[in-house]
Image (cartoon, helix red, strand yellow):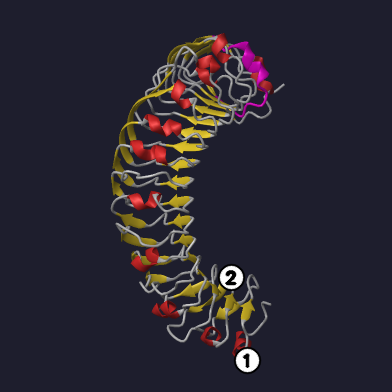
Amino acid sequence: MSDVALTSFLNLSSSLEHLSLSDCQLYGEFPTQVSQLPNLKVLNLRGNENFTGYLPNTNWSSGLELLDLSLCGFKGSIPASFGNLTQIISIHLQGNSLEGQIPDVFGNLKKLTSLSFSSNNLSGPLPITIFNLTKITHLDLSNNHLEGPLPNHVSGLQFLDELLLYNNSISGGVPSWLFTLPSLLLVDLGYNKLVGPIDRIQKPSSIQEVDLSYNNISDSIPYSIFYLVNLTELHLSSNNLSGPIPDSIFDLVHLTLLDLSSNNLSGVIKSDMLSKLTSLEFINVSSNSLLSLSTSGNDVEYSFPQLRTVTFYGCSVMQFPNFFQTSYLQVLDLSNNMISGGISKWEAVRWEGLLWLDLSHNFLTALEQFPGNSLEYLNLHSNFLTGNITSSICNWSQLTVLDLSKNNLSGTIPDCLGNFRCLRLLDLQMNNFIGKIPVNG
């Protein structure tokens, strides 16, 4: 289709109802006469990245139901005449070069169910009439330069299941209505300029994924978060949250991902509370320098059947968390903590699935045995380890990174390290080794 002259569009029949030329490698400028065809209901030119032009300001076909001009090269602004498209059901303009403000003209679009203006250069305030739409299920204004606060109240959105506003400059607080919409499953407001505390959540919610990361949200995580009973993913990283993690967060038994990293959280995460999250696959609470992790007498009874990644770097963990032994953990990062003493043979057994272990920048003095049987990455840089490198390291022929630098290790370097064909980085500097450097046999 790439050799079709765009002037051919000028000869289209006025009775045409459906025009779909998506991903046809069209190029040139959009002939505005197409949008004026009186009976046109569907216009889909998606995915023609060399197809450019401007959206006409007037005379859009009043019966248009579906408009998809996404992933093209359209420029200019969104016309206010969109407000006259009273039959429209879906508008997709994402992935263009549109700029200027979004006109606040959506109040009469009673049939609109899906609206996407993402990944453009749009600026200015959020159009308030969008938040009063009664049929909309999908709203995506992400990856623009929109600013100003979210409305304090909304009168529509009862069928909205996805709200995507990430990577803008939206400011103000986090209003409680976000968590009361009856159909909402996903809200993503990450990478904005939201401030203040998260409003108290008023009642149980259907929401499953919340992303408020990379904002300036302060105060504590509200205890009322327990109302998000269906939550599977919670992203609150890179804010200014403070205080302890509320116990109620450990009642969210459907959580698979919990990211609270890079805040000012404090207190203790207790192993018996963490063990309640039996669906958890990923937890990251790194860069909370006043946050620690405690064990209890029943740790061996806890099970984390789905847990694969635990990231606790830059906290105040003081003890190696042996309660993860029976899990199928693959990644464990405890770097930049306060773990002292040693890891015993008992603590190092099991860990069958562990591939990636980082204990660098702690106060470890002895390792009777390394945890895991299949490690690919081991970093013990900047501890106080003494003695010889344990011979069990020869079982790890899949190692790609081994960093034992800046310790007090002594003795000879095991010859087997010269036969590790996968090894890409070996750092043993600033120790007290003697003898020869192993070479590839």
Residue visible at 35% across and 45% down in the picture = 202
Name the kind of residue labelled 1 in the image.
Answer: Asn
Name the kind of residue labelled 2 in the image.
Answer: Arg
For label 2, the SS is: loop
Q: Quadrant of the N terminus?
A: bottom right
Provide the residue designation for mark 2: 46
**Label 1 vs label 2: CA separation?**
21 Å
Residue visible at 64% across and 73% down in the picture = 25
The image position of residue 240, as x and y in percent, is: 31, 40
Instruction: Give the mark nearest the N terminus, 1 or 2.
Output: 1
Height in image: 114 above or below 349?
Answer: below
The image position of residue 249, as x and y in percent, is: 41, 34
Height in image: 320 above or below 179?
Answer: above
Provide the residue designation for mark 1: 11
The image position of residue 303, as x and y in percent, is: 56, 23
Residue visible at 57% across and 18% down in the picture = 371
The image quadrant that residue 346 belongs to is top right
Height in image: 262 above or below 150?
Answer: above
* Magenta segment boundaries in residue numbering: 388-402
